[in-house]
Image (tube, rainbow, N blue to C red):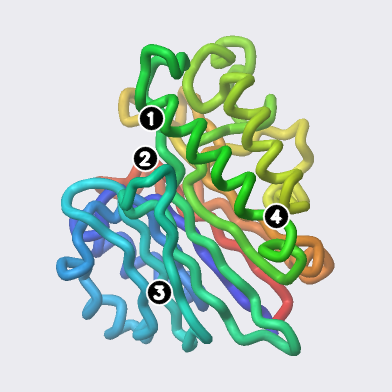
Amino acid sequence: MTLTIATWNINSVRLRIDLVTAFLEAHNPDILCLQEIKCAEANFPAGAFTRLGYKHQVVHGQKGYHGVATVSRHPFVESGRRGFCGKDDARHVQVVLPDRDVPITLHNFYVPAGGDEPDPAINEKFAHKLAFLEEMKSWLTGAETNRPAILVGDLNIAPLEHDVWSHKQLLDVVSHTPVETELLGAVQQAGGWIDAMRHFVPSDEKLFTWWSYRAQDWAASDRGRRLDHVWVTPPLRGRLLGIEVLREARGWARPSDHVPVIARIAA
């Protein structure tokens, strides 16, 4: 048996609910983790998911900005959420999945984008992003990660050289600056996380999940970045079966600028 988990920054779930339902009907993941849902919990289109069999839902939203949601065909053992940096800006939700002897914790994250200027002294948004990552590093370690756990979501950082279309040109661009990539690496190291996408795709191959709306022809220019991630803790390394990036979703009508990533894990 296989546990299938999809993650997707949908950039407004209500605006793109038809794309989401088409994706679910075509790919039928067990669990879908959404980021940037951009709606309060009361306005989440729960019925559309329930009709497709995803009746188990945990939503952490707010009006107009950010927000994450995890929907599942199967029940959760428990669920929760965490605020970061003294803010409740709807950037995290977690669920616990029944599994063999030890349940699996599944984290769904939307890390702050960080604005345009990579200088925390003059850009409050960038300072917030760095503080958010520092808090992730302090929390996601020890007892929190010495067990089966999965972390997915839009981490808003393309950490490796071939996670961006041009390493040299993007070194001073937010999402690929050394201070961000090093700090994300420290988060990963603190929890012993395995990068499931790079477990299957060698680090010297280009791998993108996001293409800017600014490009007139995103496919032809292919100036992408890998901002969306799937990590697992060591107890799940041997159960990784595969990763799929649905690049074609960027070409759908009225698309998100991110595409879905699907992870398959032996159940």
Point 41% across, 34% down: residue: 113
Label 3 crowd bin: few (<14), some (14–19), many (20+), radius 10 Å: many
Q: Position of residue 174 (x, y in %)?
A: 47, 22
Question: Which of the two discs, 3 and 2, sits closer to the camera?
Answer: 3
Label disc, if present, on residue 141 of the rendered structure: 4
Question: Comparing marks 1 and 4, which lies closer to the viewer?
Answer: 4
Report the Cα–Cα distance between label 1 and label 4. Answer: 33 Å
Please give the name of the residue rendered at 58% of the width and 72% of the height, measured from the top-left corner. 4
Q: Is residue 228 above or below residue 204?
A: below
Instruction: Say what amino acid the circle numbered 1 marks.
Output: Ser
Which residue, as the protein is rendered here, is positioned at the far right?
A: 238
Q: Which mark is residue 71?
A: 3
Q: Are marks 1 and 2 in contact (CB under 8 Å)?
A: yes
Say whether marks 1 and 4 touch (CB < 8 Å): no
Say what amino acid the circle numbered 3 marks: Val
**Labels 4 and 3: the sequence-earlier one:** 3
Closer to the camera, 3 or 122?
Answer: 122
Q: Rounded to the nearest whole Å, what is the CA distance between mark 3 and mark 2?
A: 21 Å
Give the amino acid at mark 2. Answer: Asp
**Disc on the earlier residue, 3 or 2:** 3
Circle 4/circle 3 CB separation < 8 Å = no
Cα–Cα gap, marks 4 and 3: 26 Å
Secondary structure under tag 4 reads loop
Secondary element type, mark 1: loop
According to the picture, the residue beneath numbered tag 1 turns out to be 212
Task: Report the mark closest to the observer, 4 or 3.
Answer: 4
Residue 124 image position (x, y, % from top left)? 35, 24
Mark 3 to mark 1 CA distance (whole Å): 27 Å
Residue situated in front as seen by the camera: 189 or 169? 189
For the N terminus, the image quarter is bottom right
Residue underneath mark 2 = 257
